[in-house]
Amino acid sequence: MERVYIEKQKELKIYGDYDVVVVGGGTAGVFAAISAAEQGKKTLIVEQFGALGGSATVGLVCPLMHSGVAGNPYNSYLSSRVAEKLIELGATKEPHEKNPRTFDPRVLNIILEQMVVDAGVNVLMHTYFCDSIVEDGTVKGIIIENKAGRQVITGKVFIDCTGDGDLCVRSGANYTQGNPETGKNQPISLRYVLSGINYDRFSEYLRELIEKTGIHYGTDPNCCYAACSMRAEFTVSSLFDEAIKNGDLEEQDKWYWQIFQIPGRPDSMAFNCPEFFDKIDGTNPEHLTFTQLDGKRRIMKHLKFYKKYFRGFEDAYISDIAGIVGIRESRNIETEYVITAADMIRHKKFADAYAQSNYPIDVHGKILQCDDIDAIEDDGRPYYEIPYSTIVVKGFNNLLVAGRCIGAEFYAQASIRVQESVRASGEAAGIAAAMAIDENVALRDLDGKKVRAKMEELGAEFAK
Ligand SMILES: Cc1cc2nc3c(=O)[nH]c(=O)nc-3n(C[C@H](O)[C@H](O)[C@H](O)COP(=O)(O)OP(=O)(O)OC[C@H]3O[C@@H](n4cnc5c(N)ncnc54)[C@H](O)[C@@H]3O)c2cc1C
């Protein structure tokens, strides 16, 4: 029998009262808070860590994936502002069709925090969201916990940007989690950065490897890009095989491995691994703990492998390890509309779309899945759109969700989860929150077309 303890009732102090309360100051949360504050709303971000930016900064997820839409328009006026600042500071250098892809995560963190301060957002870091106070479908307040104790924050509109939908779930919203066939979540990773790498030697080494193996797949010596997975034979696959045979790596180290240069750091590379295929529930603290502990053991093994097998890594050392486990997918909240993989593959359009994308359905695994829908509709615009209704939490008057946990079924989530779409969801949520307050309407009654129009008025770009 499960052992329990009944917590005593106690009086909680009210920390403050806000127009808009954003829970989670990550990729979506920062965009939500700035856009709400810039619409003149008294806004607060509650963040558990001592830094803003979430997966993109603390999690070291530094490449920004291309949306796959021609010209890669920013569906977010704030994204353009961030790009300008990154370019100015030399922290990105790949103006990929106007959209810088790789960036320095530490510099992005500083830029985002400065933008939040400049917008007049109130920030409460080192504070964990614990619970929600709901009356008749309206969130009245949230309960937080930090070194000052347990307190209550009240507000008019609440935006869940926790990535895992913590606020929605504690408020009683419905949600789904994991692959409907297996129940399993997407694999998770603990990202890291190595420094002390000689780019020239490594790029020459990659060129030689391509010549020797005759395999070019997943490698670009010009920017030292390299990858390996079980999907195909990569240029570096044979090195991994040799290391596994010699006991220098484990088989799981080959299942997903990927590296990127970091602009502005001439000797550093960001690693999108080690990846984990078991114990991968991002809402299970024991799984998260295991990933941090075992991830670091595996990172040390990786370092020894590079030093022995990769030319250019002789002096490499670990300069950063993500403080937040890399969660690709956990819970997805039931919203007024739940986007599906079929919507994406069929390039469905919505009048109230806040984002456009043709990023693939990117399910990690030993073998890539989802090739069962082939009825593509050709309207001359090869991308799908994400409507406002995917961020309006079903059954609530004043609760929005933004980020990777919006209303999306499993395979659809595997596409909407990339940063450009996530940023746009935050920006749309912040603007919608401000509009709903001004119009004094429930979020489900707000016209999403007006949200999109406001985003465009402020500078967000959309393919026509
Ligand atoms: C390993 C990995 C690789 C990826 N690769 C790419 C890529 O190459 N390109 C790309 O564009 N996208 C990539 N993605 C996807 C993308 O980075 C994420 O989907 C996106 O950043 C998620 O944004 P979010 O705002 O939903 O969550 P996050 O950015 O994770 O933000 C959530 C925030 O909420 C806070 N929080 C959570 N719970 C609480 C609580 N209870 N109380 C207080 N605060 C809380 C967290 O600390 C965090 O700051 C990758 C993701 C992962 C995990």
Image (spheres, helix red, strand yellow):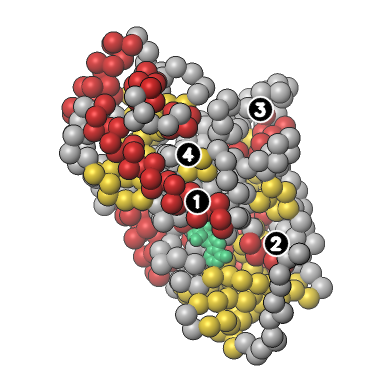
Badge 2 marks a residue whose secondary structure is helix
Nearer the N terminus, badge 1 or badge 4? 4
Viewer-nearest of discs 4 and 3: 4
What residue is pinned by disc 2?
Answer: 169
> Residue 42: x and y, percent?
54, 76
Q: Are marks 1 and 4 in contact (CB under 8 Å)?
A: no
Q: Is there any visible trace of residue 128 in the rendered image?
A: yes
> Residue 269: x and y, percent?
30, 39
Nearer the N terminus, badge 2 or badge 1? 2
What residue is pinned by disc 3?
Answer: 370
Task: Determine crowd level at label 3: few under 14, some 14-19, many 20+ residues with C-alpha closer than 10 A.
Answer: few
Amino acid on which the number 3 mark rests in the picture = Cys
- Distance Cα–Cα, label 2 vs label 3: 28 Å
Task: Determine crowd level at label 4: few under 14, some 14-19, many 20+ residues with C-alpha closer than 10 A.
Answer: many
The tag on residue 275 is 4
User: Is the distance from the Cβ of mark 4 to the nearest ligand 1 atom less than 8 Å?
Assistant: yes
- Distance Cα–Cα, label 1 vs label 3: 29 Å
Image quarter of residue 117: bottom left
- Between residues 279 and 201, which one lies in front from this camera angle? 279
Nearer the N terminus, badge 4 or badge 3? 4
Amino acid on which the number 1 mark rests in the picture = Phe
Task: Determine crowd level at label 2: few under 14, some 14-19, many 20+ residues with C-alpha closer than 10 A.
Answer: some
Left or right of 263 in this view: 385: right
> Residue 400: x and y, percent?
66, 61
- Between residues 11 and 72, which one lies in front from this camera angle? 11
- Report the quarter where the C terminus lies: top right
- Distance Cα–Cα, label 4 vs label 3: 20 Å
- Distance Cα–Cα, label 1 vs label 4: 12 Å
Residue at 41 percent of width and 56 percent of height: 323
Left or right of 331 in this view: 397: right
Left or right of 146 in this view: 270: left
